[in-house]
Image (cartoon, helix red, strand yellow):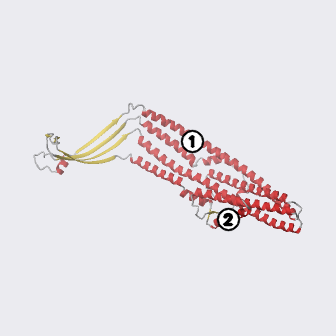
Amino acid sequence: MNIRTVFISAVLLLTAFAEVRAAQEWSLRDCIEYAWEHNLSIKQQEIQVRRSENELLKSKLDFVPSFNASVGYNLNWGRSVDLQNLEIIKNKLTQGTSAQVTASISVLDGLSKYNTLRGNKVALSISLQEVERLKDEISVSITQAFLQILLSEKILEAARESFASIQAQRDRTAVLVEAGSQPYSSLLEIESQVASERVQLVTAGSQVTENMLALRQLLDLGYDTAFAISAPDIDFMVDTYTPENIDEIYASALSMPRIRGAELELQKSIYDLKISQGRFYPTISVAASYGTFYSSTSRSPIGAEDYTFFNQLRDNINPTLGFSLSIPIFNSWSVRTEVKNARLNRDSKEIELMSARQQLYKDIQTAVTEAGTYWSKYVAAEANMKAMEESFRYVEEKFGIGVLNATDYTVSRTNLFKARSEYLQAKYQFVFQLKIIDFYKGIPISL
């Protein structure tokens, strides 16, 4: 890649970056709330919430007696029975109509309906917690992507300043070479450094573009959508740091959706076990019906030939009431096997809950430890950067008057840029860890 191509690429990147800055800026909170509203995984889980609501309503309505109505009409032209006097009728077309209303309800079922209702209430809570868990995950991912953009923008800003400085130094060196104060080799070395820092500038701009794309993808934004983020002041966050108490954070984090979801899963498995155990018990149900019928062969009890349709329906009313008892004796061990599997599922959910709590504690330990580590790195990097800035000022002065050669000047400038980059990385990594700790404390993530 020649110098002209690199320079053109740098100009294009910087122009694109300026256009993005002209767009409406989004805060971190804006990005998070937009993702909550538009993320497809969250939308999918919200559909599951509605399914759980439907299942809960269904289990409530299971306590209401079932009602059914039926109406029938039939033609018969063979042998039939006169339902009025039970006489056999041969080779005569007959017509019949019947109507019936039935109702039934389960009186005793081993508390299966009751435990199903309670289990479905828990299932609804699980679905809601899953929505919150997804929101938590997307919040952390967006926060990380957001801070990566801020970091890359700061590095790009440092690269711009360094590039402008080396260009100015090149111009001064050209004047000194022209005057004979410095050898021509010094100008060549500076020109080489200018080309190197131009590549550095393009790389920094590309990193901003890549990080911006990563955030766009998290938000599911089209690439043609004008988008830029605000750059909040985070310096007040890094003034000082007091180590956090891990146990206190853990106590607060136990109400997080991922833990509450595991607790509810265990509770749901207990109700599932009770439902399975309820199938060992007898079931009692009550059924009632109210029906009537009409037959074209029927005659009035008093002998009238004209026994009308509605008269028959009135006279043939037949209400019934019945009870049934079902006692499970042997069902190929299916119920017993179902109970064993339900008990194993409950034990599995207990282990999953313990594992979730254990992992949460480890994650908090890691977050607090890394916050302390990044704070130490930040303090050391800041001191190193200030020392490098002072050293570079001295080198730049000496090089400007021709006392120092271009090689030493280039090394000093490279070390300064590296020190600034390390300082910025430590700073934003520390801020991210602070946001993670706030997340575990239950504090909404914002900058």
Q: Nearer the viewer, residue 142 or 421?
A: 421
Residue at x-position 57% and y-position 47%: 258
**Mark closer to the chain start, 1 or 2:** 2
Residue 196, how many percent across, how many down?
76, 59
Residue 259, how many percent across, how many down?
57, 46
**Above or below 375: residue 22:** below
Q: From the viewer's perspective, tell me whether residue 383 is left or right of residue 65.
A: right
Query: Label 1's element?
Result: helix
Q: Nearer the viewer, residue 194 or 357?
A: 194
Q: From the viewer's perspective, tell me whether residue 60 is left or right of residue 76.
A: right
Q: From the viewer's perspective, tell me whether residue 417 is left or right of residue 138.
A: right
**Above or below 225: residue 373:** above
Residue 82, how many percent across, how many down?
16, 42
**Above or below 184: residue 422:** above
Query: Label 2's element?
Result: helix
Q: Quadrant of residue 397?
A: bottom right
**Can you identify the residue that label 1 sits on?**
353
Residue at x-position 59% and y-position 57%: 217
Kindly check if marks 1 and 2 are in contact, taking CB atoms under 8 A apart as contact.
no
Q: Please state which amino acid type lies under the numbered disc 1.
A: Leu
Q: Quadrant of residue 139?
A: bottom right
Name the front one of labels 1 and 2.
Answer: 2
**Can you identify the residue that label 2 sits on?**
12
Q: Please state which amino acid type lies under the numbered disc 2.
A: Leu
Question: Taking the image as drawn, is residue 157 in sight?
Answer: yes
